[in-house]
Amino acid sequence: MPGKGEGGMAGGAQAGGTQHEKHRQRMYRRVEKTGFEGFSEHEVLEYILYFAVPRRDTNPIAHALTERFGGFAQVLEAGEQELLEVPGIGPTSARLLHSLLGIGRYYAHCKTSNIRFLRTDTEKEAYFSALFYGQSSESFWLIALDDRLRILRRAKISEGVSNAVGTSVSRIAAEAVSASATGVVLAHNHPTGFAAPSAGDIAATAQIMQALRPLNIFVLDHYIVTPDGVCSMKQRGNLPRYNPATGEVCYIHE
């Protein structure tokens, strides 16, 4: 059953209904021709809501959503109960909007599921972009590799708030040893920050490298993912280095 104001037609709106239908048809043709290029955020929401609210003007609802949550991304990140508080949003449209991020994550996962090796920069960027797709809080991952850089295992080590995440050196070591890895790649995200390592990121990486070195497991790189892009600590020159003479890890933080 449609929720309050969802899917019904307001009284006396028969003439307006024809106008709305013509507007929808123009929107359909526009998307078919150019995708969502040039659309404003509320227009994309308006279009999405067509599929949950078939007989109403969804433009005011889209405006109400962006005013309530601040933007398109925030609307998709909102919970169903929060969405239901917006006038014109019922259970069907709330479930649709709330599902979109999960669908996007599943798409990203499927698109990179055939990646078996992390050899090229293109493979790595695609893999880690998909891994953190749509994430609004920080998480820390370990990718265990063999000598051929074949992916043996990936494990989420920890998850935190939007700007902080803890790491467990013992858990990282256990996962790497259990996978029979000879190398690992570390990765975490900065959902609201820059695609660059902090001093804490570099220090934590050095600590992990120091713990894995006696196990003959090497940290090959540490990736940081943000909505703006993917950063490799190795490519930036921030990855700590092993001293072959002493076996110690050396680094200089920025």
Image (cartoon, rainbow, N blue to C red):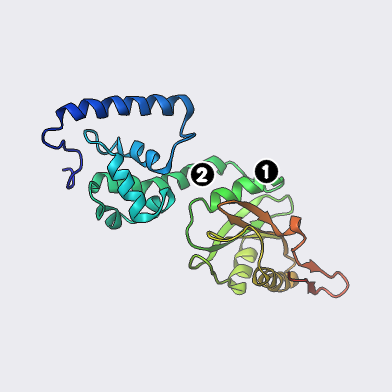
Q: In the displayed structure, would residue 24 be above or below residue 118?
A: above
Tell me if 85 is positioned left or right of 191 in this view.
left
Instruction: Indicate the secondary structure of the residue bearing disc 2.
Output: helix
Q: Quadrant of residue 173?
A: bottom right
In front here: 219 or 57?
Answer: 57
User: What percent of the width, then of the height, locates residue 27?
Assistant: 37, 29
Q: Residue at x 54, y 69 (%)?
A: 165
Tell me if 217 is positioned left or right of 27 in this view.
right
User: What percent of the width, then of the height, locates residue 137?
Assistant: 48, 62
In front here: 5 or 23?
Answer: 23
The three-letter code of the residue at mark 2 reads Ala
Instruction: Indicate the secondary structure of the residue bearing disc 1.
Output: helix
Tell me if 50 is positioned left or right of 76 in this view.
left
Q: CA distance from mark 1 to mark 2?
A: 15 Å
User: What percent of the width, then of the height, locates residue 181?
Assistant: 68, 60
Q: Which mark is residue 199?
A: none
Q: Quadrant of the C terminus?
A: bottom right
Q: Which mark is residue 108?
A: 2
The three-letter code of the residue at mark 1 reads Thr
Q: In the displayed structure, would residue 200 be above or below residue 35?
A: below
Residue at image mark 1? 122
